[in-house]
């Protein structure tokens, strides 16, 4: 029986992850691993055989034969495609005749993307007994695995375990770690910034190349560079500081990028490709800012906000990203940005709408939306993404809308979707967030917009009778 929670705990076990890293194997072909899987494929007459090591956020395949492209070339998949993680979780073999009929695994991405129908995996163990991964055999058609086939698979897995344990015992190879600057250095005198290579990484995959130009973005704690992954345009986000806020933002970006392995319909978003403790590689959303002849295409932006909310992350991600509205309200009440009466009204509404949660961008504005060459829309950002009360993105767009008519159209969308109550909560909290921004010169137009939004939220609350 597959236990998802036990599996997650086993995969993330720190000692096990150290043992995986101690093998020195990476997401690239290893000659002895490829020999093992090719021999096993001939012996058992199966089209796909993999020697898999399960890491925290992905599985790597130093030994692989028969996988469809691009997976055979990449030698890694995210855990959304991993059946082997459940062998790690159970600590014993797993044999399934038809994944499509399995009560837990029938939704696995491995079925559609990797062509997995029948699966059998035997654990491979490290020196201290940790399950590092599997030697697994795969068929694209339903197949009942026989006793002799499983016995042969176990013998081959035992040989792999002995080899991996020997690798763990060997002195680790000397590797130069990537040197990441604490802050972007100034361009050398006499050279244009566009000609400067700021950072030469020493530990990134061979599949990744960086453009020789200044970062697309830079900040106090991270750089964003352009690059290519197997020829595909990507963004390379590099964390350059170790303070808690920088680490928290980096992990947030990583979590969102990984969660979107399965995208909402017709909504491309940054896709996870690779990461280490400081670097995140995601597909770059190439396109133009969402602008039309009359300015921003607000209809497209509001449609995108609604479309995003139809997608659901995994239950564990949903729990982790659920926004604490009680703490949000209390913070603004303590700071005097919400009156006691407003806080009480919001608390009543939050209790009433608590179960009406939806995934949202969290701070959606037109600058976060790009139109691709195909005409489709794509989202960028996601720093504040999470599980909010419905209408959070519509509330953010209402602040950005320059004309009262557009705001009325957004109100109408909230009414038609029957989310007026949570929309009002989000609108008032957005107004409080805007008021909390650092002091400084603020255009009069922005002040007027804040006051107008606050009055609007209060009117909505009054109309609801709270």
Image: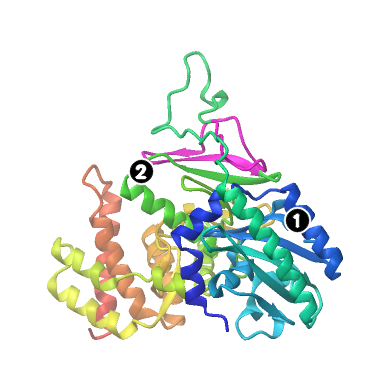
**Camera-side residue of 53 and 465:** 53
Above or below 359: residue 445: above
Residue 101 seen in the current view: yes
The foreground one among 416 and 99 is 99
Question: Residue placed at 49% from the left, 53% from the top?
Answer: 18
For the C terminus, the image quarter is bottom left
Left or right relative to 315: residue 93? right
Write down the region rendered in magenta: 200-228
Q: Which mark is residue 72?
A: 1
Q: Is residue 171 above or below residue 350?
A: above
Is residue 226 covered in magenta?
A: yes
**Residue 289 visible somewhere in the drawing:** no
The answer to whether 218 appears left or right of 204 in the picture is: left
- Quadrant containing the N terminus is bottom right
The spot of residue 143 in percent (x, y) is 80, 81
Neighbourhood count class around disc 2 (C-alpha, 10 Å): few under 14, some 14–19, many 20 upward: few
For residue 157: magenta?
no
Q: Earlier in the sequence, mark 1 or mark 2?
A: 1
Residue 14 screen position, x and y as percent: 44, 59
The foreground one among 424 and 281 is 281
Question: Compared to 412, does 135 lie above or below?
Answer: above
Q: Quadrant of residue 72?
A: bottom right
């Amino acid at each position: 029986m597959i236990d998802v929670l036990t599996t997650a705990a086993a995969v993330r076990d720190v000692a096990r992850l150290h043992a995986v890293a101690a093998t020195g194997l990476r997401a690239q072909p290893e000659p002895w691993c490829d020999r093992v899987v090719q021999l096993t494929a001939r012996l058992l007459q199966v089209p796909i055989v993999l020697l898999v090591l399960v890491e925290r956020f992905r599985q790597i395949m130093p030994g692989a034969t028969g996988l469809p492209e691009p997976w055979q070339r990449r030698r890694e998949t995210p855990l959304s495609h991993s059946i082997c993680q459940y062998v790690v979780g159970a600590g014993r073999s797993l044999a399934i005749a038809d994944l499509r009929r399995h009560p837990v695994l029938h939704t696995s991405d491995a079925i559609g993307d990797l062509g997995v129908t029948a699966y059998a995996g035997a654990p491979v163990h490290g020196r201290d007994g940790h399950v590092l991964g599997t030697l697994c055999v795969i068929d694209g058609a339903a197949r009942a695995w026989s006793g002799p086939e499983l016995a042969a698979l176990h013998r081959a897995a035992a040989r792999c375990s002995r080899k991996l344990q020997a690798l763990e015992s060997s002195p680790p190879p000397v590797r130069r770690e990537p040197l990441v600057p604490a802050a972007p250095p100034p361009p050398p005198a006499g050279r244009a910034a566009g000609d400067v290579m700021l950072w030469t990484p020493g530990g990134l995959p061979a599949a990744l190349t960086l453009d020789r130009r200044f970062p697309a973005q830079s900040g106090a704690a991270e750089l964003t560079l352009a690059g290519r992954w197997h020829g595909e345009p990507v963004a390379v986000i590099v964390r350059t500081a170790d303070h808690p806020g920088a680490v928290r933002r980096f992990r947030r970006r990583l979590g969102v990028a990984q969660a979107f392995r399965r995208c909402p319909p017709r909504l491309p978003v940054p896709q996870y490709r690779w990461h280490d403790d400081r670097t995140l590689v995601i597909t770059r959303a190439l396109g133009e800012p969402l602008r039309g002849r009359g300015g921003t295409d607000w209809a497209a932006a509001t449609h995108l906000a609604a479309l995003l909310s139809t997608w659901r992350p995994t239950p564990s991600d949903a729990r982790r990203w659920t926004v604490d509205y009680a703490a949000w309200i209390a913070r603004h009440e303590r700071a005097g940005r919400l009156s006691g009466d407003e806080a009480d009204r919001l608390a009543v509404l939050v209790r009433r709408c608590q179960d009406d949660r939806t995934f949202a961008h969290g701070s959606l504005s037109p600058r976060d939306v790009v139109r691709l060459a195909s005409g489709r829309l794509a989202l960028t950002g996601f720093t504040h993404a999470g599980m909010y009360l419905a209408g959070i993105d519509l509330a953010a767009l209402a602040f950005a809308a320059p004309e009262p008519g557009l705001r009325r159209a957004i109100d109408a969308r909230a009414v038609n979707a029957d989310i007026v109550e949570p929309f009002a909560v989000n609108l008032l909290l957005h107004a409080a967030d805007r008021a909390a921004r650092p002091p400084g010169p603020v255009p009069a137009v922005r002040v007027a917009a804040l006051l107008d939004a606050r009055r609007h939220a209060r009117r909505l609350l009054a109309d609801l009778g709270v």
